[in-house]
Image: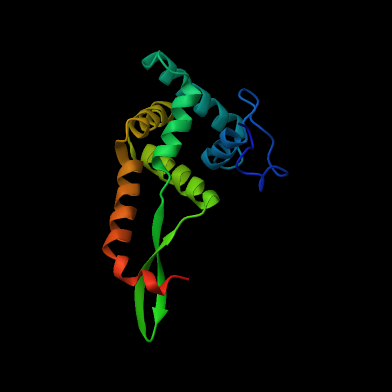
Amino acid sequence: MAGKYYRSFEHHLKPDPVYQDLDVAKFISCLMHDGKRSTAERLFYDALKIIGERISEREPIEVFRQAVENVKPMVEVRSKRVGGANYQVPVEVNNKRRRTLAYRWMLEAARGRKGRPMRISLADEFLAAYNKEGGAILKRENAHKQAEANKAFAHFAF
């Protein structure tokens, strides 16, 4: 599964040391602050350990993958200027951007859970997204609602 869908960053990024997965490596890179990869890796793997303790019927990495799939948006709105007016035009999201938005929204939601260690917040967000709940799923639903509301402007698509 590693690198099966995303070949574009394969030459820049090495698979993560535990799962040999490029998607996990990419998520860890997004999680990383100030170049502290080892800290980001520890946070991610600790979050998966917490998930493993809470859910015994599925592998933690599968919970992570399913959570990302649940958060990936299908459509988003983009501004398009037509004749002096700006329209929010719904457009389909390509695979790379879908993954990027999913990672960004999951990290945003986890960082928004104040007063708890990041590994626990991350585990909570993964589980919430896995169960189609939580901040990242809410963000996805809002993007879909906005696209649905602006469906009338779809003929302006890029």
Q: Nearer the viewer, residue 37 or 90?
A: 90
Q: Nearer the viewer, residue 154 or 87?
A: 154
Q: Residue at x 47, y 19 (%)?
A: 59
Q: Is residue 14 left or right of residue 97?
A: right
- Report the residue that reaches farthest toward the bottom: 83
Residue 111 location (% of width, % of height): 39, 39
Total residue callouts: 0
Identify the image quadrant of residue 132.
Answer: top left
Identify the image quadrant of residue 84.
Answer: bottom left
Q: Is residue 28 above or below residue 63?
A: below
Residue 61 location (% of width, % of height): 50, 25
The image quadrant where one finds the N terminus is top right
Q: Is residue 124 above or below residue 143?
A: above
Give the color scheme: rainbow, by chain, secondary structure or one colour: rainbow
- Report the residue that reaches farthest toward the right: 11
Identify the image quadrant of residue 52.
Answer: top left
Q: Residue at x 61, y 24 (%)?
A: 19
Q: Nearer the viewer, residue 85 or 152?
A: 152
Residue 80 location (% of width, % of height): 41, 74
Residue 2 location (% of width, % of height): 63, 32
Q: Residue at x 38, y 86 (%)?
A: 83
Q: Nearer the viewer, residue 97 or 119?
A: 97
